[in-house]
Every structure is written in C-alpha cells, then in structure tokens.
Amino acid sequence: MGQADMHIHSIASDGTASAAQILEFAECHTSLDVIAISDHERIEAAIECQRLATERGGRVEVVVGEEVTTRNGHVLGLFLQHRVRRNQRAEITVAEIHEQGGLAIVPHPFSAFSLGMRRSAIMRIHQSTDPLVYWDALEGFNPSTAGRYGRTATARLAAELGLPLVGNSDGHTLDTIGDGRTHFPGSSAEDYRKAILDGTTTGSCVDWGLVREAFIYSRQVRKQARDVVRWGRRTVLRDGTPRDLGVPIDQLRLQQDREVNREAGRPGPRPMATAAERGEAGEPPA
Ligand SMILES: [Zn+2]
Ligand SMILES: [Zn+2]
C-alpha cells in the first residue's frame, strides 16, 4: 500500500518550512510516497516542490495542491495546473478544480474553527447536476483539533454519500508531515488518484493534542512576525524585500512568466450555472 499526505502548508502561506525543506523531510524522515503542498490560495511552493522532486528523482512524488477559501468554507484542490481564486461560491471553485483535471476534497468537514464546510454546503455540491460540480473525497483523518472535531460525523457522511475518506496532516511545521495519511493500492500519484476514483483509499492519523498544537502555533506566530517585518521593510523603506514564499527568486520569475502567458491565451471565465441549471434553489449571497 502507498501512503500520501496531500495537505501540507509551506512558508508561502501559514506554514513554516520552504518547498525544499518539505521535500527533504518527506524523503528522509517519513515513509510517504506522495505529498502535496496545499497552501492557502497559492501554488508557488507546490510547483517548486514538484520541480525539485522531478529533478531529484527520489521516492517521493509531488502533486500541486491548493486549499482554496470559498464563501462556503475551505476546499482542497489536488493535481492543479494553475491557481484557483478565493472567495467564490464553492460550486465555482469545485468546477474550476475539475475543469483543470484536479480532484476536489472537503478538508476538515464541519470544523467551525478553521472554515470547515457545513453539511448543507457539502450536500448542495454532492446533489448538483452540473457535471463538474461533485466531491471526490472527504478528509476524514486530520490530526488537528479542528480535524478531530467532526471525525465521526465525517465518516458517517462519507458512508451515506458513497464517498472515499482520505487522511492528511494539514501540517504547518516539518515534524508534523505524515501525521495524517491516506493509504492506497500502489505507490504513485496516479495510483492515488485512481484509488480515490475507485473508492479504495483508507486513512489514519495521530492526534496532536493541545500541548503539541500550542507549540506548532507558537512557531507559526514567529513566522508571521517575520512576514510583518518584511512587509514593513517593503512598504516603509521600499528596499524591495520580498515576502518569503520559500521558492528561489529565479524559479518564482519563471512561474510568473508562465502564468502571464497562460492568462494571455486563456478564454473568459466560466459562466456561473443558473439555479435552474443546477436544479436547486439558489442561496442568498454570503
Ligand atoms: Zn483548512
Ligand atoms: Zn490546511
């Protein structure tokens, strides 16, 4: 059985490690076969991590992910080609993930602390008639307090909807990578995708507990303080200090050039399905 942790945060969002450090840790200190960096609203570090893994040719395969904030809570997009914008209706986000060949997963369902999606929103997407609007899996194993909250309800909902469960660490520090895992037949990223589509995944996780979580949080606060200092230098002193995305500047430029080219050749945004097309009553805007 292969093992995957597809919900890891880097320094580019609210995590504390760079793309290179995350890959190094996964290779040398875990038995994971596949990982994804899934930063909040960004994919720079994920793309860099994937590039480094290809260059290295080691055991660990890297998938580009993003944890997208929608008007209905967080959505985890995996196997992404480009970034999905934040603050859209969850239906639009899920459709945009599928449009680019990705998987759409509900991270830490029902968790009120961390923008976990509520049952009503999960059901609305599950029942949608739009061929691009559906769930691929629910994250049933997440070691944080946020993830623990609602674990039983998530397992029950997955059984009710016939959806597979996955496990992820939602790790924000190096030592937490692999604390939540998905077990799947095979060992490659494509095996992982196939297992989700076939519904053959299982998950596991270790619970952090409040003491460990407080320690993790203190490291996040230190990292955020460094971000504020950099922001201050950039705006007050105008010394060009960039926000630390944990990606070398030359690689960041290459990514930005590719993104500009993609935007230039891209058709217009996907039109929003009407309530009638979705076969349901619309909800009032958030
Ligand atoms: Zn989240
Ligand atoms: Zn997360």
Image (cartoon, grey):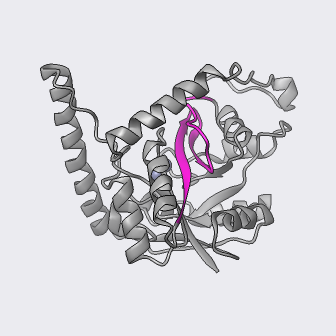
Indicate yes or no whether the magenta region holds residue 26. Answer: no
- Left or right: 121 in relation to 173: right
Q: Which residues are magenta?
A: 61-88
Image point (21%, 26%), residue name: 240
Rendering coords of residue 58 (x, y %) = 49, 71
Q: Quadrant of the C terminus?
A: top right
Residue lying at 52% horizontally and 60% vertically, measured from the top left: 54
Give the percent coordinates (x, y) of residue 106: 62, 51
Farthest residue toward the left?
237
One can see residue 111 in this view = yes
In-image side of 213 versus 104 (left or right): left
Q: Give yes or no for residue 87 being in the magenta stretch.
A: yes
Name the foreground residue: 170 vs 84. 84
Q: Image height check: is 8 above or below 4?
A: above
State the residue at coordinates (63%, 63%): 189
Relative to 179, 187 lies left or right: right
Most extreme residue toward the bottom is 1
